Amino acid sequence: MTMRNDSSRALIRAADPRRPRRVAPRQGQLLLDADIAEDARLALGRIETGAADALGPAGRLLVPAGGDGFRVARDGAGLRIGAGHGYVDGALVENPAECALDAQPHPVKDEALSPALVVLRTQERHVDPVEEPAYADKALGDAEAAGRGLQDWRVFLLPLKQAVRCESARDTREWRGVASASTGTVGIAVASAPPASDPCSLLPSGGYTGLENLHYRVEVHDGDPFPGLPDVDGPRFGALGLRLKVSRRNASLMTGIVGRQGVELTLSPPARDARNWFAPGMYAEVVSDHDDLAPRPAGAPERLFPVASASDDRVALDATEAELDATGLRTDGGWRLRLWDRLPDGAGWIEVGKLGADGLSAPLPLGDGLSVVVGGAGTASFRRGDCWTFAARADGTVDWPTGPGGAPVQERPHGPTVLYAPLASLGSPAPGPDPEDCRIPFAALSDMALHYRGGDGQGVIPPADGGAATLPGKLRLAVMRGETPVPNARVFWTLPDGAPACRIDGALLQPGGFVRAETGATGEGLGMVEVEWTLSAGQPEATHQVLATLGAPRPGARSVLFTARFDTARGTGYAPGACKDLEGVFTVQDALDALCARGGVAARPLPRVVGVNWDNDAFVSRHQLVKDGLVFDFSDPMDPNALQAGDSCQVTLTLWDLGAVGDACPVGRQARLPGTLHPEGAAPLRRVRFEPGWDASCLAAAIDRFAGDPVAGVRALRAEVALSSAVWRAEAPGPDGRPLRLNGSTELEFGGAPMHHGFARGDDGLLAPGDALTSRDFRGWFFITD
């Protein structure tokens, strides 16, 4: 639907396959409309082929560097399309003003889809003077005026099953389903001459039997869609069930719909040629300005209706009002009525039935001795609007090539040529909040370019005093126009997100700031810029980066990223070699740590007790002790084998003999409180419980006879608890393969009032850590009260 006119020929199939250089008009010879069209095609083809070859690659939108043409940006919950221009396969595509996705020339609903591709579709669309009155000249009255070929476009969203980067966007099944060209074919068959029945009559000539020179157009109207393919840009149809409509005048008759009364439409401009106008028995299609770029989905309401009656400026359609309402028809100036021919069987379209073994349909009659043959077998694909045109002449010939035996050559659609390009990827794994920009910028021949000359990837040893360190080599760049150095060009140095502060030529560079330098103007430094880069040793493990930008930093500006590191043991690789003890160690830092651990310094803290079930005052009633036992929490999973050792947990009671030397001088002796040790909770082992072997009555008798008086007014038995480091160890060994034994130091408190604290706790409420270098028993005490 990109060329709706009555030109005598749309294709010129010369024997020489090479493209002609130009049309050569001569004095006194005819200059046909086909010659004028061919001259424009040759010039446009030369320009677009040269642009595509120079800019490349195919199937991508190429934009001038720094330009905003078709840049996709978020605008709240929606998307905006930047103003400017770009090139797709050499074709110039323009957006004169920034617009929202749902306010572009052919609007699309702005949905919050992610992941998805933002896709540009562009094609040449024929704009008739009926659509754009400025193309007509009032001085010519009712004379027909030429239209224009507009490189129109639409941006739409293509949903994806999973997010992709721009470079792999065109490898997805969804992209191929939308952007692949139609593969179905059509051939035009001409009836052969029947044998003569009367020897005295003239022999029939066969071929096209019409009396006029006509320009036929065969166009895909509808069909049965392929399942599983995206239909966001219109459905794809198979050959079986395909419906084709036909016009003997290239569907060039179109007029505007300016009024409606029921099923009667008021038209403007009115009829200019009574022989080429709507008439009963013909077919009329209701179309809008958006049909070429926004094809209707499969199953959309029918828009092609028979004509019931017609006058110069009114046409009544053989349809119901509900059927017309379903088309979306409005009289706001954006809807038209186009004329199509009635076929020999009275229908408005041809429907393709069964295909033969050769993948071709039977000849489907067009009338006047012509038939159409549809091909492409079961895998052929068509889209709404695919068209084929050919000229039929009053001398019986048809401008369609034939093959061996006179069979018509099967040709893919003559038009429209639809181009696609990804603009942005929504939900892309690329970093940043904005959609990943899939456009490809290119520089003009006179543009300045920033070239890397050295200094990236350096390393420096961190200074011993923790200050700053200047890299041994300078960061070097060149600014060029082609092969010409550019003097006094400004280069701005900034920090990428997350990069540590640094100094450029001694000037402090912090996040959000910049340092400016200029290229040299004379001698060997012409067009060159060199700066010293000083790193802060406060972040020795960080990756240090700085960004050089030609001109003030802005989106799309040309930049070069420099990276540097401090040379530390952690950033230097290590291969174990003959040292089998260090297998699995990959940096020098880890190797040194492992060797230190073998010499007595643990590579990670030793396990310790971090909690018990009595508070810091350490008074436990005999009933509580019998009921709850003593519960110990460990910082690491412990080896369960410790539960089987006899000395894994020892609780010792101090029995004061008050009658030995009098109440003032009690004598104490030690007695072990029997008990058993049990795991608490599921594996791994992080909590154990000591269950006393005495019941509460036994403890009551011991308190009555042997209780001391450590604090005035309190009768209690003093109990000491010990967990042996020889038994308790972490379930996982250290880096050197040796066991990590219990570090039980608790920094016991012997001062303060009252003086009965069993151990100290840290700010986090856990038992205070002990010495992290050596293992030792856990020891503490508490008091058993009545």
Image (spheres, grey):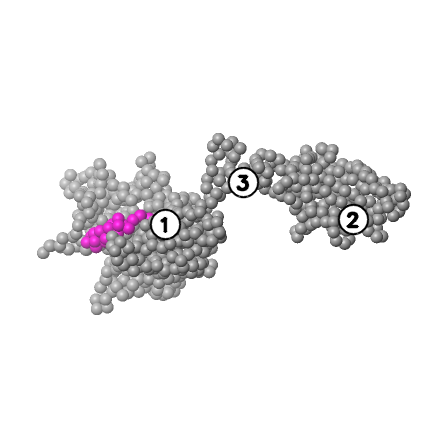
Residue 350, compared with residue 112, is above or below; it is above
Tell me the CA gap for discs 3 and 1.
32 Å
Rendered residue at 77%/53% (across/down): 754
* Residue bearing the label numbered 1: 473
How far across and how far down the image is residue 44, in percent?
23, 53
Tell me which numbered mark, 1 or 2, is placed earlier along the sequence.
1
Q: Which mark is residue 593?
A: 3
Q: Residue at x 27, y 43 (%)?
A: 411
Residue drawn at the location 25% of the way across and 60% of the way down: 147
Q: Which is nearer the eye, 327 or 24?
A: 24
- Mark 2 lies on residue: 619
Magenta run includes residue 417: no
Q: Report x, y in % for residue 130.
A: 29, 62
Q: Residue at x 36, y 56 (%)?
A: 549
Residue closer to the observer: 461 or 388 = 461
Under circle 2, the secondary element is strand
Query: Which label lies toward us, 2 or 3?
Result: 3
Q: Gap between marks 1 and 2, in whole Å? A: 69 Å
Q: What amino acid type is highlighted by mark number 1?
A: Gly
Q: Residue furthest left?
A: 27
In percent of width and height, residue 21 lies at 17, 50
User: For residue 57: magenta?
Assistant: yes
Q: Which numbered marker is on residue 724?
A: none
N-term-proximal mark, 3 vs 1: 1
Labelled pair 3, 1 in contact (Cβ < 8 Å): no
Q: Which amino acid type corresponds to the residue marked 2 in the rendered image?
A: Phe
| Residue 61 in sight here | no
N-term-proximal mark, 2 vs 3: 3
Q: Are the residues tagged 1 and 2 within 8 Å (C-beta)?
A: no
Instruction: Name the side, left or right, on which 719 lies relative to 421.
Output: right
